[in-house]
Amino acid sequence: MRWTRSIGPTLALLAGAALASAVYSGCGEEPAPAPADPTPVAEAAPPEEEPEPEGPPPGVDHTIEEGQTLWAIARAYDVSVNDIMEANEMRPRDVRRLRTGQTLRIPGAEEVVTITDAAEPEELPPVEDGAYHRLIDGETLWDVAHLYDVPMDDLMARNELDDDSVRLLRPGRSIVVPGVTERQVERATENREQSLAQNRASRGFRHVVSRGETMWDLARMFGVTVSEIMAANGLDEAGVQGLQEGARLWIPGVERDTGGRVRRQLTQNQQRAMRRAERLGLGTRATATRLLRGQVEPRWIAAAGGNRNRLPGHLRWPVTGGWFVRGYGSGEGGYHLAVDIMGRIGWNVRAAAPGVVGYSGDEVPGYGNLVMVVHPGGWVTMYAHNSANSVVAGQTVPRGGILGEVGSTGISRGPHVHFELMFDGNNCDPAQLFRPGVRHRDGHLSPIRHVPWTRPDRPPERLRCDRRRRHPRSRWVQHESFDD
């Protein structure tokens, strides 16, 4: 029996109720014995039934190592991805939730295989929704996204890449770029070595690590995610933790302007989004303050998708594989009207629902790198303390779209996402809207009674919502003061 730990007032109550239901579900009384027959008769012995096989299907257990994908594991054991998924009762969405250290049953295998080479064969299966791009030395997935102006989350979803495996891609790996043709790839990769060198020279520079400087410091300083820096320099988590003074790191995706300031380059889509934000009045600190106060303009709702008759009804967990650490209504006086979610270094922060980015920046005191998304119906979600933001104001994001990366900027005690759900000037407890539930560090989900939110004009009756409040000692806690 796995018991639910304390996870905040509202969440703990809901989880406990669901747990009690699970304990007694399917449990009933023993069937009453049949009445005795006064005239016993001889009966033939029932035929013996073959016992059902117990335990996992025949095969071996493979422990996933860092950077290994389901595709690479299937190829190493000469089995299909579908066979592994069936043996482990996996659904398609489970593929992207695979994590280092997880054990998979490999059906039909007789011994564990050591996977040392992740390069693909020369012939690849045909694709109809895009074309292959083969990585060369020094090229990252971010370079590919910039080259074809394709969102990172589209590349990750199409190639079944999780947050850990992206930065571990190596030369020779072929990536399916959705929405492009082979001819477009040929044109984009002509004289690629020379163009990549020129592109990298204009989109990055070499940085010498100072004493006490961490990877988080570099991400915050240059506005580049930790994953990008790791991928550009071939670093794993051990390399990040053991970063030494004097190390020379390539900082990708940035450029120096005429004043010598370093800034991140925007894609063409992001440049168009910034112009759209300017027309709509999005993206400023004043906008962020208004969103915190619940002042959402009709034109912002229209940009998010309008005031539809129905909403999606549920929210996506903002960090794939991330775990719950603090709930709604916790803290002194119950001031914390948010959910805090932790994750490993380099993991992405994703949109809980589709909408338009209303603010992306670091101008709100205490929150660090902050993203706020306006959704259909006028409700707003907030994602704070990111190591870096990956979106700009005015940018349309789908459910699950990458917004930034888990970080510890602003007033924060460790890398996590401070997630808030706001509607009509109130903060609402998002726990009951998460589907399939609230995830914990050991991977289990708190069984919570789901409350669908389908009407854009008001939240469901059972959803707890409260007026935004300050920290009881807000003169020391800046991030609870949003009026200045």
Image: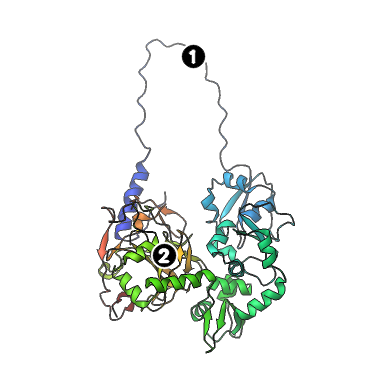
Which quarter of the figure has residue 438? Answer: bottom left
Residue at the right extreme of this rendering: 122
* 135 and 332: which is toward the camera: 135
Q: Is residue 291 above or below residue 308?
A: below
Residue 268 vs residue 71: left or right?
left
Q: Residue furthest front?
A: 279
State how many labels appear: 2
Amino acid marked by disc 2: Val
At label 1, the amino acid type is Glu
| Image-quadrant location for residue 425 | bottom left
Residue located beneath label 2 in the image: 356
Q: Which residue is mark 1?
A: 43
Distance, label 1 to label 2, CA atoms, is 74 Å
Residue 236 percent coordinates (x, y): 60, 70
Locate residue 457, reporting x and y percent. Answer: 28, 56
Residue 99 appearing in the image: no
Model colouring: rainbow
Q: Residues within 10 Å of mark 2 (few under 14, many from 20)?
A: many
Name the quarter where the C terminus is drawn. Answer: bottom left
Task: Give the mark nearest the N terminus, 1 or 2.
Answer: 1
